[in-house]
Amino acid sequence: MARTEILSGLVVALALIPEAISFSIIAGVDPGVGLFASFTMAVVIAVAGGRPAMISAATGAIALVVAPLAREHGLGHLIATVILGGLIQVALGAAGVARLMRFVPRSVMVGFVNALAILIFMAQVPELIDVPWIVYPLVGGALALMVLLPRLTRAVPAPLISIAALTALTLGAHLAVPTVGDRGALPSSLPVPGLPDVPFTLDTLTLIAPYAVGFALVGLMESLMTAKLVDDLTDTRSSKTRESIGQGIANIVTGFFGGMGGCAMIGQTMINVKNGARTRLSTFTAGVLLMVLCIVFGPLVSQIPMAALVAVMILVSFGTFDWHSIAPATLRRMPAGEIGVMAITVAVVVVTHNLAIGVVVGSLTGLVIFARRVAHLAEVSAVVDPDGGQVVYAVTGELFFASSNDLVSRFDYAGDPDDVVIDLTDAHIWDASSVAALDAVEAKYVAYGKTVQIIGLNQPSARMHGALSGELSGH
């Protein structure tokens, strides 16, 4: 219902403010640049995106990508990079890059979720160091309130009540604690569209292109992984292609409005979904209310204690972590390779603080383990005719670069009869490596003056073998 969507959007907007300011600092730009990005990203993606209820805004991953460029060449080049990165995302989305998500193993997805939860929690730790002692009971009280209140009523999101209660308490009791305002000044007017202040030359394009490519890939990776996570949490499907293109459109618009760009914001998305939001209204509301809070209620919002927002994010991190995945009973049943892939994904993400790198490394590790596993599924067995004039080798399994590597060594070239038959009825040829291996087998038999007949190829295998056989060796 609309009330749930709007209230959830309000909670997200409140949580976005300190995050956007922090990411602006990481990127080396004014707080308004991150806040404007969060506003435009959320509003545009609410219309153009493919995953309802997902929040897109300025993010730490994007900030890390563009920070060196902003530091060395200024805001103008950063804005140009955001626009070019958005154009690349639109192109990649139209080219179907979202279909690559099918190659992400489940163990990587679980590792992604657990690493996300760890990063959300770790991001709150600095807010609890070197602070007045009163911050700790405030955080504890806010957590208790958010855990217990839903047992009484769900009419209003518990995080919103917790934020309001702690703000009223700290103001009423004149408690000196860190507040949102300590992060930086909030903007007092809406962003104005314009072109980036850079020379429109080939040198500029050459300079920003590598950053734009990194920006586009990191943004799409995090957005598509988050979209898949929300799909699983809500038992609904979304258009990943539309989401990819929508991310690009949102970044192009953000660039023209002077924002630092962004992508799906996982922590805020989890807040939104956990509060019951399921439609685009919550995302749109979050973006609009973000600007309303900054421009109209800036002085009040600046007084919100960081303890309240830290408590919200801690609860989100605990709710995000897949505790079942590390339960002893689960670990006993899971194959060691799957556990290893999950652990590697978590470790890489936590060390690099980059979810995209962790997903890539985890997926590659999973593919290597899978390749090693299926490489042993190709079997070769020989049957010699009673008269000894012919031998039939039956090859079964999937033939590709890993499984076909030792295929050449499975035949008795010197001892076999003059007539050799290789039966591939129960096999499938997947790549050129397998064709080359079969060519090598045939060449070795010919060197011994024997004939080889390959039979039983299914249609795709026959087509590949016919096109490549004899064409893969330059000798």
Image: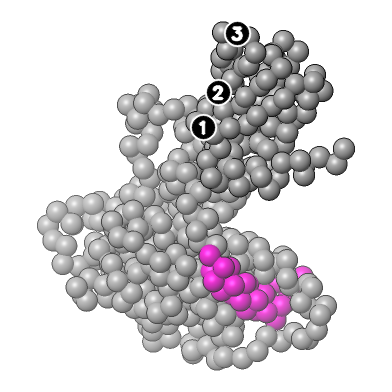
- Which residue, given by chain and number where applicable, does mark 1 sit on? 425
- Which residue, given by chain and number where applicable, does mark 3 sit on? 387
Q: Mark 3 or mark 2, which is nearer the start of the sequence?
A: 3
Residue nearer the viewer, 330 or 396: 396
Residue beneath the point at 38% across and 45% down: 321
Toward the left, the furthest residue is 152
- Horizontally, is 47 left or right of 216 in the view? left
Residue 297 in picture, x, y percent from top left: 37, 83
Q: Residues within 10 Å of mark 2 (few under 14, many from 20)?
A: some
Q: Residues within 10 Å of mark 1 (few under 14, many from 20)?
A: some
- Which residue, given by chain and number where applicable, does mark 2 sit on? 394
> Which residues make up the magenta segment?
70-96
Residue 355 in picture, x, y percent from top left: 54, 52
- Secondary structure of the residue carrying tag 2 is strand
Do tag 1 and tag 2 residues touch (Cβ < 8 Å)? Answer: yes
CA distance separating discs 1 and 3: 24 Å
Residue 419 in picture, x, y percent from top left: 68, 20
Task: Please tell me whether residue 173 belongs to the stretch shown in magenta.
Answer: no
